[in-house]
Image (cartoon, rainbow, N blue to C red):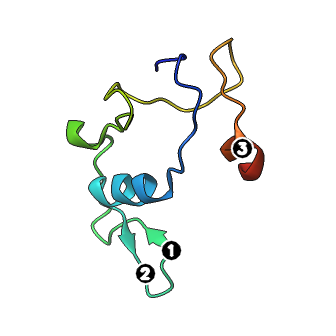
């Protein structure tokens, strides 16, 4: 959320934690499924809000929506 920090970060590990926190369950092939009881939390605990390792600010998705879009090597390799 701090556009002065022009870095992107991989979010794979965070996404897995967020899916599990919502109640999704991995099957034998590692694919997330809705639990048998169908109950899911539609949010994540506040401690899972990603923080910037440089300044501790909340992080947000890198979207090409305004002048804060970061186009670094991580962005290029992800595309």
Location of mark 3 (residue) = 73
Location of mark 2 (residue) = 27
Query: Between tags 2 and 3, which lies in front?
Result: 3
Q: Name the outermost residue toward the bottom.
A: 28
Quadrant of the image occupied by residue 54:
top left
In the image, what residue occupies the spot 50% across and 57% down?
12
Q: Position of residue 18 (x, y in %)?
A: 36, 52
Of the numbered discs 2 and 3, the one sitting upstream in the chain is: 2
Quadrant of the image occupied by residue 63:
top right
Q: Is residue 19 visible?
A: yes
Q: Secondary structure at mark 1?
A: loop
Query: Between tags 3 and 1, which lies in front?
Result: 3
In the image, what residue occupies the spot 58% across and 38% down?
8
Sort mark 1 into few (<14), some (14-19) or many (20+) by Cα contacts within 10 Å. few
Q: Considering depth in this image, is 72 or 28 the residue closer to the camera? A: 72
Q: Are marks 3 and 1 in contact (CB under 8 Å)?
A: no
Q: Position of residue 30 (x, y in %)?
A: 48, 79
Q: Name the outermost residue toward the top.
A: 67
Sort mark 3 into few (<14), some (14-19) or many (20+) by Cα contacts within 10 Å. few
Q: Considering depth in this image, is 63 or 43 the residue closer to the camera? A: 63
Q: Are marks 1 and 2 in contact (CB under 8 Å)?
A: yes
In the image, what residue occupies the spot 43% across and 30% down?
59
Q: CA distance from mark 2 to mark 3?
A: 33 Å
Q: Position of residue 58 (x, y in %)?
A: 36, 27
Q: Secondary structure at mark 3?
A: helix
Say whether residue 19 is left or right of residue 71: left
Q: CA distance from mark 1 to mark 2?
A: 5 Å
**Residue 50 to residue 5: above or below:** below
Q: Is residue 39 visible?
A: no
Of the numbered discs 3 and 1, the one sitting upstream in the chain is: 1
**Residue 64 to residue 66: above or below:** below
Residue 31: image tag: 1
């Amino acid at each position: 959320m701090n556009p002065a920090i022009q870095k992107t970060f991989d979010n794979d590990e965070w996404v897995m934690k967020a899916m599990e926190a919502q109640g999704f369950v991995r099957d034998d092939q590692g694919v997330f499924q809705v639990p048998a009881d169908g109950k899911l939390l539609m949010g994540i605990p506040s401690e899972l809000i990603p923080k910037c390792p440089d300044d501790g600010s909340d992080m947000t998705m890198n979207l090409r929506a305004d002048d804060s879009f970061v186009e670094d090597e991580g962005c290029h390799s992800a595309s």
